[in-house]
Every structure is written in structure tokens, then in C-alpha cells.
Amino acid sequence: MVSGQGFQVTHEMLRSAAGQLPNQVAALGQIRGTVSVRVPGTAFANVTGSPGASAGHGANIDAMVRKLVLESDRLQGLIGGIGTTTAEFRSFDDEQARRLGEQNPDVVLAQADAGATQPGVTIVQRDGREFLHIQPSNRDWPAFEIPNTVGAKEGFRVTNDWLDSSHTYSVDTATSIPFDRGRDLVGQAYAENPTPGPDRPATPEGTLNDALDFMPLTPNGNVHSYVVPSTDPSRYTDMIVNYTRSDHILDPGYVLRRGVLAEDGTVTLQTWGEGDGFAQNWTFSPAWRPMNWGVWELNQGQIESTVLQRLGIK
């Protein structure tokens, strides 16, 4: 559901219905008045009624009118509360979508699969399990899901607003690896070496690694390293995802890694990171950006060397 669109139609329908309510109230009022002056026992609406039936019919009409008046007041109050600005529509939509997700998480998942979600991380539930649905802000990277084995309690969004801590970074490394021969080997090497630290191999369910183990004086950098199958093997290797645990200094955040087919037929190694950890606030980017680039460039040099050796090229 796209914020600002999903429920706006409903708002307009409510307004239209509310506009018609006074006419309906007046019409029923006339019917009530007509019925109330009839002589008990005479015919009305092609039905011959007894005095009791006539009185009962009049009471029913009265009750209907009172109910419609109450409904009119209620709808007018509801519409007034919803408001008319785009921001208010968006807020209303988001709240309704959240409630809908609590009632039926599969609906939220279906919307995510349809590409209707905004960039960010959303927790979804399906078949008794919890997953992290991730739509990177860089649309060159696909939306995907991983099991929530990191125990994330909530998702996050990247706004790149200097007032908050959300951030992104990208590190690309050109290689001499031929894509047609090296695609699977690149995926394997990435899985074996998913972070800058000494690693255990990434798995579909996520393997615990300390991404900052190579920096012994830093707080821990615990992540789970996942393997996500390629969405297009003719262009991309499998993808590696390093998602932070809550005790990671940069939580919440994730790093995506893959090889992509370059124009000259070789593999370009790519790393894309997003997060909302305060230590990587945009204000501090002159300090952390060069370090990020250097660390991932070094790691991708290791990936290239491993693959070339296995191909017998180096």
C-alpha cells in the first residue's frame, strides 16, 4: 500500500456519503411525518395495517431517522479527524497499514512482494516464522528476505537526513575474473569471507560472525551472515547479507555483497551498506567513509585473489 494513496479514496467516499446524509435524513423525516398522520388501520405502502402495525411502523421510522442522524454526526467527526493534507493522509495510511499487518501479516508480505513498500527493513511473519523484508534504498539491489535470526525487534528506514543517523555507502572493485567461469566461485568466496574479520561461512539461516574482530580495541561487531540466491544468475552472483545484532556498535544496519557482470565480461565486486547507527551519522562521514572504503576494498581484494587462484589464473 502506497502511503497517501491507499486510503485517500475512502476518505473521499466518506465525504460524499456525508454530503448525502442530510438529504436522506430529510426524506425519511417526510416519510415519518406522512405515516404519523395516517388513520390507524388504513393502508400504507400497499400493505393494510392494523393500528398496532401502523404505530410500530412509525416507531421504526423514527428509530431509523435517529440512527441516521447519529451516524451522520459520527461520520462528520471522523472525517474532520482524518484531515485533508497529504501528510495527514500519509499518517493515516501508515497506521491503517500497521494495523492491517498485525491482523494479517501475509497481506503486508504480499504488498512487499509487489514492490509497494518504501525502502527500508520491515518485520513480517509467515508460516509461524519471522522474517526481515529488506528493500534497499539503492534500487540496483533487489528486495529480499532473510530469517530474523538476529532477533531484530523493529525495522528501520534510511532517509539520508543530516538530522538523523541513517546512512549508506558503496564500494565497487573491478577485477580480472571472467564472469562466465568465475560467477559461482565468486559467490563461494564471498560466502567463505563475508566480513573483514576472520569468518565462519555465511548460510541461508545466518551464521554468527564478528565483523570487527580485526579491530580488537573496538566494541563487538556481531552480525549474522546470510546467503541469498541470485535473482538473475546471468548477471549477478549469489548475494551475501551481513545483518547487525543488537549488540553491534552500528546496529541497526546491514551490508550487501555480490559480484556483477561488467561490460567487458569480467566481475565487478560490490558492497553496499545501509544503517541507522549513531556512530555512522552523516556528520561523522569524513572519518568513517575512508575507513569503510579501505576495509571493504581490502576484503574484495582477498575475494579476487581467492577466485583467481581457484581458476588457475594467478
Image: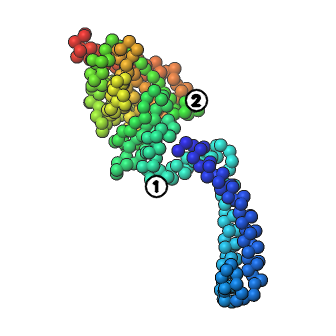
Residue 240: where, in percent of width, then height?
34, 29
- The residue located at (73%, 75%) in the rendering is 31
Where is mark 1, residue-wise?
103
Q: In the image, what residue type sits under mark 2? A: Trp
Q: Which mark is residue 287?
A: none
Q: Is residue 222 visible?
A: no
Where is mark 2, residue-wise?
162
In space, the residues marked 2 and 1 are separated at their CA atoms by 35 Å
Extreme residue in the front direction: 46
- The residue located at (27%, 14%) in the rendering is 308
Question: Up-down: is 154 above or below 271?
Answer: below
Q: Please state which of residues 14 and 166 is positioned toward the viewer in this rendering.
A: 14
Residue 159: where, in percent of width, then height?
55, 33
- The residue located at (55%, 26%) in the rendering is 283
Residue 160: where, in percent of width, then height?
55, 30
Regarding mark 2 in the picture, which secondary structure is present there?
loop
- The residue located at (51%, 38%) in the rendering is 118
In the rendered structure, the answer to whether residue 218 lies left or right of residue 312 reads: right
Task: Please tell me in which quadrant of the rendered image residue 215 appears.
Answer: top left
> Are circles 2 and 1 on residues that touch, CB within 8 Å?
no
